[in-house]
Image: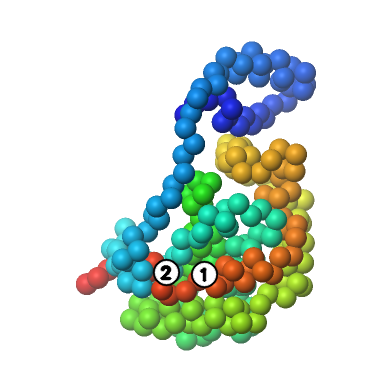
Amino acid sequence: HYSSDRMHLVIYSHLPLEKIEAEVVDYFSSVPERPTPTISYCNPIFPTDLHKKVVVIPPLQETHMLELAWELPESFSEEQYSHADELVGFILGHEGENSLYSQLKKNHLIEGLGAGKESFGKEKLFFTITCKLTKKGVEHYEEVVQACLAAIDHYTKAGVPSYLFDEVSKMKKMRYAYQSREDLFSNLMEFASALTIEPLETFPELTLTPTKYLPEKMDLLFQHLKLDNCFLTLATDPA
């Protein structure tokens, strides 16, 4: 699958642009274009017979984690403008008053909570809610699951107001404008990965910030997050 028409190249250098272009041509123009088949992963990654069941995994470290995961339809990976998964993750994972986090924390069931998407290639997306459980939370993990599903049900009915979209969009733009220095290699890998999805003409705008308020996309995502197609993982010592 190493073919020039599938290649995305990211260069970081202090050299003048003309020098960089000449060296890129010199080093990479010999990469051939090969006839390669189009690969499509149609089968689900999670076995459907594990939906609604809890898989208990002994953790490598002394920690207790509960994860609710949903494999999303391919249409979510094709949509780039609304960042519906990030907005839904922000709503379910924020730590403000009356939030899912504050409710579970008040009841001493969790130490932390996060929500958002995970990507496995271009076509496979997952949405996850991950909870770091207390010992009480392990004993009452079903209560944590029910609280997560109740929060999803609430926003399925109530919808996502536009001001939250504006807030997240402004926050992400500010984070990009005032970003801290990070490991260069990690940044380049992130850019190269994003370029496989977003066209160069708009990069990195669509990758970084929501550009359109599309409540129907968030509604579709909330409607997909049901127990019937949820894969539950509990990382704790089964003893």
| In the foreground, 80 or 171 | 80
Residue at position x 60%, y 62% in the image: 85
Residue at position x 65%, y 82% in the image: 158
User: Badge 1: few (under 14), some or many (20 or more) residues near its Cα, within 10 Å?
Assistant: some
Query: Pointer 1 and pointer 2: residues touching (CB < 8 Å)?
Result: yes
Q: Which residue is mark 1?
A: 224
Q: Position of residue 40 (x, y in %)?
A: 46, 44
- The tag on residue 185 is none
Left or right position of 169 against 121: right
Q: Which residue is mark 2?
A: 229
Q: Position of residue 186 (x, y in %)?
A: 57, 41
| In the foreground, 100 or 79 | 79
Q: Position of residue 167 (x, y in %)?
A: 75, 67
Left or right position of 194 against 21: left
The image quarter containing residue 236 is bottom left
Q: Quadrant of the C terminus?
A: bottom left
Residue at position x 55%, y 63% in the image: 116
Secondary structure at numbered mark 2: helix
Q: Residue furthest left?
A: 239
Secondary structure at numbered mark 1: helix
| In the foreground, 141 or 205 | 205
The image quarter containing residue 136 is bottom left
Which label's residue is closer to the chain start, 1 or 2? 1
Specify how the rendered protein is coloured: rainbow
